[in-house]
């Protein structure tokens, strides 16, 4: 157990639907990062939050959004889902903003999303 | 565009043999990360290399970083079946994009008896 908790582990939904993925960072970590892993695109950074504020944005679609709550857990909202959104979505956390961490980033076990 | 290239992408090894995975990157990043992923599982942090010339070892794995050459290597010594997994290297993205790790495509390692 890495200390980063993601729920649900698996999610199957239909095209056009909306889903919410949840992530609780490791205790004491202030930053949360979301990544998407797919066969064709590999691992791609989506977005980062630090202590409730958005800090960095990667290749995140406009249909996707995220937020970090006062208790530091984060949610990734995916809407108007398409078949191509099927992927493994990882959450990672780090103590600070990440770049100056000597400990790297701790990843959760992921949520496997299947859009049918 | 910042790129991270790993080779080989697939590696089939016999137990007891040695091999090296290479990771080249196009940015001037001064740190590099290695992760291991078992099928359908999370990414497990193996090494964080923080400076030029850094060398870290854990069991049969040893990682090194040459920031001038923009090259990191992951050396496997006397491979065992338990090392079968996909190995990723990653570097920090552009300045100001903390946590924006840029990953290589991964090297899928299969160790056979």
Image (spheres, coloured by chain):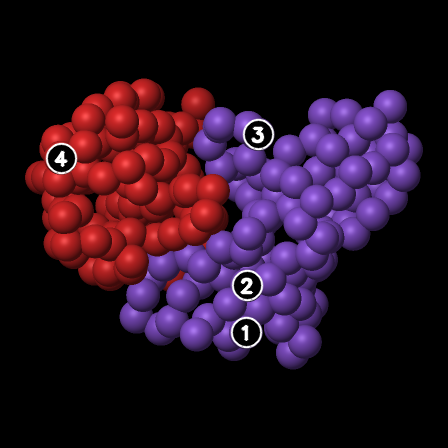
Q: Is residue A101 visible?
A: no
State which chain is coloured purple.
B
In this rendering, do the residues under marks 3 and 2 share a single chain?
yes
Image coordinates of residue A10 in percent, x first then y, are: 32, 21
Q: For the residues marked 3 and 2, what is the alpha-carbon distance in whole angstroms?
A: 21 Å
Colour red, chain: A
| 1 or 2: tag closer to the N-terminus | 2
Numbered circle sitting on residue B26: 1
Gap in Å between the C-alphas at discs 4 and 1? 38 Å
User: Residue at the location (65% across, 46% down)?
Assistant: B107
Which residue is most to the right? B16
Q: Residues within 10 Å of mark 3 (few under 14, many from 20)?
A: some
Q: Are marks 3 and 1 on the same chain?
A: yes
Disc number at residue A54? none
Secondary structure of residue under mark 4: loop
Q: Which mark is residue A16?
A: 4
């Amino acid at each position: 157990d890495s200390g980063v908790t993601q729920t649900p582990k698996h999610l199957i939904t239909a095209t056009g639907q909306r889903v919410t993925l949840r992530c609780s960072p490791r205790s004491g970590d202030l930053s949360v990062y979301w990544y998407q892993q797919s066969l064709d695109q590999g691992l791609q950074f989506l977005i980062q939050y630090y202590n409730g504020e958005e800090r960095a944005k990667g290749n995140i679609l406009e249909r996707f959004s995220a937020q970090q709550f006062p208790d530091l857990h984060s949610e990734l909202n995916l809407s108007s889902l398409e078949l191509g959104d099927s992927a493994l979505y990882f959450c990672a956390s780090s103590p600070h903003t990440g770049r100056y961490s000597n400990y790297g980033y701790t990843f959760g076990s992921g949520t496997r999303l299947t859009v049918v | 565009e910042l790129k991270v290239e790993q080779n080989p992408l697939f590696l089939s090894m016999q137990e007891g043999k040695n091999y090296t995975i290479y990771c080249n990157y196009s940015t001037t990043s001064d740190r590099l990360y290695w992760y291991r992923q078992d099928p359908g599982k999370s990414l497990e942090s193996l090494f964080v290399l923080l400076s030029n010339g850094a060398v870290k070892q854990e069991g049969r794995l040893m990682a090194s970083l040459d920031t001038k050459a923009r090259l990191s290597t992951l050396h496997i010594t006397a491979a065992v079946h338990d090392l079968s997994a996909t190995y990723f290297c990653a570097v920090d993205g552009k300045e100001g994009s903390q946590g924006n790790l840029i990953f290589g495509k991964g090297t899928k390692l299969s160790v056979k008896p």
